[in-house]
Image: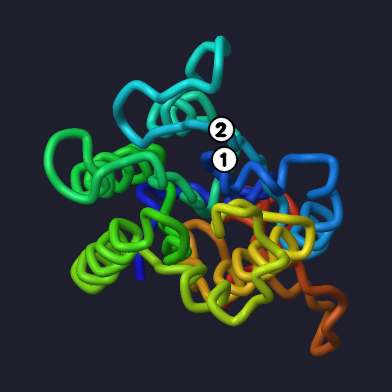
Amino acid sequence: MPQRTGAEPVPRGVEALLVGDSVMAGMAQSYGFPARQLLAARHSFILDAKGCRRLITTSCHIGSSPPPTNAITAVKQYRGQYWAVLVMAVGYNDPTLGTASLDQAITVMMNEAHAQNIPYVVWLTYREAGPSAARFRAHNQLLRIRASTTPGLVIADWAARSAGLPTSWFSADGIHLGSDAAKSMADLIADTIDTLQWPQPATACNLTATTSATTVATVPGTDLVAASRLNLACPP
């Protein structure tokens, strides 16, 4: 299990940062509101998904609009605003191997997550549909290999889950999300976060206040300084 560095207690606040391209951007649209509600009921999150986003190189652009920030820039911009997991759904506009590829980007993102003290990166596999299905299949093969050898890299298998969904839930290109597909993606993300195990920080303990032999209250996650102020004792 990946460990947070340092001795600080596990923080509270926004759990997850979701960074996506135009596929995940379906969750950010007005019709994606039910998907956002579904995920928010289970985990707190920040969602930053932009059309034409690339992983670590200059993004493409739609029409006369300027290109959005690439994924690594977005991740760096949210440093300190979430504490548990980085969720990646970018790469539909990127090559599998070579310069500025998915292969290189996995290393870059894992290094950045480590620098931010984020223990997990959840990476969605790519729906294998449309004219670029062969490239997305290669993406997924690479992701699974990298996840098998990279601590903290966790696969959320969107390719497998979406394969069983009605094609009417997607746009004509086979990959972009309609409302129901967005809800299914949100559900997958929540399910995957549910499986993660969180390390116990060195200064945290479950404390029990007692009078004589009678338990009065349990105070989870109180640090040692707070314990001394409350006249509580950390069990060994």
Q: Is residue 202 visible?
A: no
Query: Which residue position is annotated with label 2?
Result: 51
Label 2: few (<14), some or many (≥20) within 10 Å?
many
Q: Residue furthest bottom?
A: 213
Query: Which residue position is annotated with label 1?
Result: 22
Whole-percent x, y for residue 80 in the image: 53, 32
Identify which residue is drawn at 46% across, 64% down: 129
Q: Nearer the viewer, residue 199 or 65?
A: 65
Whole-percent x, y for residue 24 in the image: 60, 48
Identify which residue is drawn at 57% across, 40% down: 22
Whole-percent x, y for residue 17 in the image: 57, 44
Mark 2–mark 1 contact, CB under 8 Å? yes
Dividing the picture into quarters, in which one does residue 213 lie? bottom right
**SS under mark 2:** loop
Q: Amino acid at mark 2?
A: Gly
Quadrant of image for the N terminus: bottom left
Q: Nearer the viewer, residue 136 or 145?
A: 136
Identify which residue is drawn at 55% across, 53% down: 173
**SS under mark 1:** loop
Q: Earlier in the sequence, mark 2 or mark 1?
A: 1
